[in-house]
Amino acid sequence: MALIKFTSKGIYCPKGDFYIDPWKPVHLAVTTHGHADHVKTGNQAYLCHELTKPILLQRLGLDLKIQTLAYGEQLQINGVNVSLFPAGHVIGSAQVRLAYKGEIYVVSGDYKVVYDGISTAFEPVKCHTFVSESTFGLPIYNWLPQQQVFDQISNWLSENWLQKKTSILTAYSLGKAQRLIKGLSGTGRKLYVHSAIANLNEAFIKAGVDLPETIRISPEISKSELQEGIVIVPPAVAEGRWIKSLMHPVTGVCSGWMQVRAARRWRGSDAGFALSDHADWPGLLSAIQATEAEKVYVTHGYTAIFAKYLNEIGIAAEEVKTQYGIEDEEVIH
Amino acid sequence: MKRFTELIAQLESSNKTNDKLAALVAYFNEAEDQDKPYVIAMFTGKRPKRPVGTALLKEWAIEKSGIAAWLFTESYHHVGDLSETIALILPPPKQVSDLQLNEWIKALSALNGQDDASKKHFITNSWDSLEIPERFVFNKLISGNFRIGISGKMLVNALARQSNIPANQIMHSIMGNWNPEEITYKELLAGAHVNTDNSWPYPFCLAYALDQEPASLGAIQDWQAEWKWDGIRGQIVKRGGELFIWSRGEELVTDQFPELHFLREILPDGTVLDGEILAIKAGKILPFSLLQQRLNRKTIAKSQLENVPVGFYCYDLLEYHGKDQREATLNNRRKNLVQLIAGIPEQEMLLLSPVITAKTWAELGALRADSRAMNSEGLMLKKLDSLYHSGRKRGDWWKWKINPYTVDAVMIYAQKGSGRRAGFFTDYTFAVRDGDQLITIAKAYSGLTDAEIKEVDAFVKKNAIEKFGPVRTVKPILVFEIAFEGIAESKRHKAGLALRFPRISRWRKDKKAEEINTLTDLRQLLNSTL
């Protein structure tokens, strides 16, 4: 009997009787990370990495039943050995390793293989069966080294300051925002963040994460102060009226989709930076090869293409329909 | 090459004319002088001979990237641009070249006539020595086809601002006969190779669409009514023995219409005519779709000259005996125009656009209803005492167009767009009802707002039934009103008829697929126009 099943509620482990990142309420949700497409409200209990707990409390409410694990720590659930390993996607993101009678499965959630300076670095885990995302599963996606992307962003910022323009960077509150804050703390300019980001930052700092100083955006901060600093907001805010009221606002979108010109132009933003929290094509392939898995299930992204390619290079792969990646869809659209 | 690549990125990152203009001005201030004539040539469609075809480029890119052909094709569908797909899919460069743009262009043009092996050697080595953005530009240099939304006019304005030379003069200079290898930027802008003095056109006087009852314009006797022809507004300038034809876009199109070159001999010097460039055969005005085949061609086939001859219908006289007429009333200009045309030998290509006489607005309205029968778009109403204004001025000139035809149809296929809208389902195929079947009648990709496109895109992703490459069959649910300008019989289409200029006029969210039009409705319309 397979250790996991793909059901209408999510990825299910029949032996252990729990779900991983379910999209419908269940009694126990093992949670890979805190993005909205991977964790829903209404579950009776959650199991996640200790740094994902503050995110869940912040986002889903304080009355949750949450059990946490450190990376590498093991827990038996109905005889199934469950442990978490760093996925490198965002702070607290984890791959879920399941072991039962010598059979090992890894459900990776979302991951990236390069270290982003803030999330615990991805760690390949050997297994028989691997469940992989494929958000950027096309060979056109090859990320530049992070430092080069930050150089691009810094050049853009310098040009904006010179021309008295207000720089607005859009980034997910969880993940991309902290990565930007860390990466841009060396500019010496003040970092102004939207309250959705500020709330998460506070939760992280309380949980012991070392984050550079940021300022929560409030009406007291003058527009010229914002112009001289860096404004970081979630994508949904970027099109709002508040942004338009700033001094010569220019927006830069930080997302892997920005690799393609059409996506950059479509967003109508002033600049696009291909900075992603997902693995690029070579990243996906190297991660999968490192697991030495005999079977790969391909979830959200270019599932059909990526699965077909894996089969061609001799890795048995199958595409699986899930409800993950919806948030990413919003990034492009 | 780096600076030019930066320009391309800037031009692409904004839709605002001012930003683009500023980027162009900055480029022409900063770029290498030798590069500039090449850039002007490129942006005005002066394309060098293409040294390598797309099939070979694709083959070499697939080989070099080491991926399967199907995977390359999938990537291409996602990116929507071959040059960009190649740039992204190749391995990173080994070393970076600092050749200038003009050197790259010369090296590419030197490939013509060489064998495929040498071409491949050069192209693949070049790919290896360029970063992704430069590689993309390099690939575009091969095709010579940059679609970045730079009109000739915008380029001219940028050059004018950068050089302080009047825009009209620059337009004439860059439309002239020159070769980027043989001319400097300075010489080119100064018009060293052309005589720009004779060509000046006047700014066109434009009309607003009539948004009120014509009766509210006052007495019909104060107005001149003409057909609104569906061609290209133009100006014919004859001065100092030279003839120039300008289009409404303020582009020189003299070379495109050799049928009108005889006017050099016939028109007196110091004459400027405002009118419409039209396809005219045996005295009958042909539809715009035929005229279109004649536009923007480097060479014109003999058969095209025979099948779609081009003439000019005169509306107005802007210069007469070397004198600017724009301060004269329309009444007087028209008199002089009639006299001028009467004074030249009779022929079929330069004609007066007739004035339509009617005693009442109602009578005129009835005549307007027949516009389509003569391939006209409706009527123009011009006040007899109006002067010839520069640009649009409310009140003196009105266009009173007839409404387009419309049909309610349901979307059955969707395809991803390319360019700016790559990755989104933006090209739709529509069907009407034929008994209990749906039959396709039109494909359209314009007319929706970005927000609506996003909504349709989400619908397509949720409601796709089948997949044929980039095309999705979708459940027939979404109803759109399709506007079109004409209908014709067609053996090539299953429906047996084809719509002219179909476009989405609005999304009928209020209608269900059961309520769409039928093929019989369209056949009846077709019969009524024959």
Image (spheres, coloured by chain):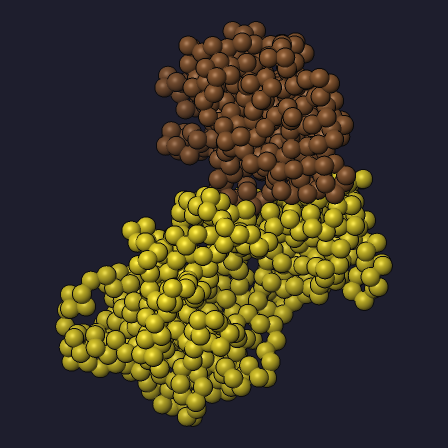
Chain colours: A brown, B yellow
The residue drawn where x is 59% and y is 84% is B302
Instruction: Give the x, y percent position of residue B321.
Output: 40, 80
Whether residue A142 is visible to the viewer of this picture, yes or no, is no
The residue drawn where x is 38% and y is 64% is B436
Instruction: Give the x, y percent position of residue B330.
Output: 27, 74
- Total numbered labels placed on residues in the image: 0
State the image quarter where residue B404 is shown: bottom left
Query: Foreground: A327 or B151?
Result: A327
The residue drawn where x is 75% and y is 50% is B61
State the image quarter where residue A100 is shown: top right
Query: Foreground: B204 or B339?
Result: B204
Quarter of the rendering occupied by the C terminus of chain B: bottom left
Looking at the picture, does residue B395 appear above or below residue A83?
below
Whether residue B512 is visible to the viewer of this picture, yes or no, is yes
The residue drawn where x is 21% and y is 74% is B365
Instruction: Give the x, y percent position of residue B113.
Output: 81, 67
Looking at the picture, does residue B85 appear above or below residue A116?
below
State the image quarter where residue A52 is shown: top right
Looking at the picture, does residue B420 appear above or below residue A150?
below
Q: Is residue B421 left or right of residue A130?
A: left
Query: Foreground: A5 or B410?
Result: A5
Q: Is residue A182 left or right of residue B391?
A: right
Q: Is residue B287 left or right of residue B469?
A: left
Q: Is residue B277 left or right of residue B365?
A: right
Instruction: Give the x, y percent position of residue A258.
Output: 58, 38
